[in-house]
Amino acid sequence: MRPIPLKDFRPAWRPALCAVLPVACLLAGVSSAGAPPAAVPAPAPPPAPASAPDAPPAPASAVPPGPASAPTAPAPAPAQSPSSPLPLRSAHPPGSALPPGSVRSPLSVAEIRQAQERLLELGYWAGAADGRWSDTWRHALVAFQKVEWRKPTGVLNRAEWSELLRALPPAPRERGPEHIEVDLARQVFLMVDAAGVTSHILPVSSGSGRAFRAPAGWRATADTPCGHFTVFQRGSGWHKSELGQMYNPLYLVGGIAIHGSLDVPAKPVSHGCIRIPMYASRTLPHLVPREMPVLVYGCKDDSPPPPTPAAPVVAPAAAGAQR
């Protein structure tokens, strides 16, 4: 007799058969009540390893995550062989304090005072050495820089301080009776005594050498003449001329004079006069007698004689007494 497949059982008698043969009905997917059996629960996942007891088990329907990416460890530095040199590092990185005496280190108050005393010893016209850098001292340093053919900045740094310590007093162009010298090439003013000692050294600004037109309409060239002159006339206080104002002028030739000015740049810019700083022009007329000789040299067509040997250093007190 051919066995009847379970799928051919009629619903009416399936419950009776399932009551007798429960295993057969279970395999056919039919319960004793005629309904499909409940789904068999999936086996529980294995417990987590002992090393991670607090980690919750992953859901059965979730895709298990991949292994966590471990942080990349930095590559170990190559071993330094005893013979390989160490990398060079600056002893003073940017922003760090520089040691005293360094080329870039700032000057102390004592060093500024030492520079001021040295300027007075060399004969430059300034005030009292008090360690404060004023406009008067800036003019004195500009005069020193011009005499030494350095850039006339008026800035006292360690390089200028070092130059001051090894400098010598400037030598005059001529010796003889007391007189004034104006070097147009270096743009400086000097007073020379009977012994040939230079003092009261100042920066000046002379004629620019450019053509100009006066307000009255006449034209000329802004030249300062070279030669031997004398102070033939003087004025007191401010004097207004056609070409500008002059303070305490000392006239040399025509309307050209040595006079004080509020503007004394490092280069020649005047119409022909010799400008000096105001602090010196207040005292200079008291130091210059009438008809005092004045030697102006340093023009383009002027051939200077052999330099005169340097005179002895002027005493600091004598240089500092004049303002």
Image: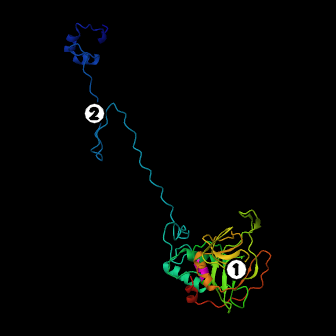
Prevailing secondary structure class for the magenta stretch in the rendered image:
helix
- Give the number of the disc on residue 44: 2
Q: Is residue 22 above or below residue 220?
A: above
Q: Is residue 242 above or below residue 56?
A: below
Label 2 sits on a secondary structure element that is loop
Q: Residue at 69% of width from left, 78% of height from top?
A: 251
Q: Which residues are magenta?
A: 160-164
Residue 217 at x, y = what percent?
A: 75, 62
Rendered image quadrant of residue 60: top left
Q: Is residue 177 above or below residue 181?
A: below
Residue 288 at x, y = what percent?
A: 65, 85
Determine whether label 1 and label 2 are within 8 Å by CB: no
Question: Who is closer to the viewer here, 102 or 169?
Answer: 169
Q: Is residue 219 magenta?
A: no
Residue 109 at x, y = what percent?
A: 49, 78
Q: Is residue 322 left or right of residue 289?
A: left
- Badge 2 local density, few (<14 within 10 Å), some, or many (20+)? few
Q: Amino acid at mark 1?
A: Val
Rendered image quadrant of residue 319: bottom right
Check disc 1 and report the residue beneath it: 182
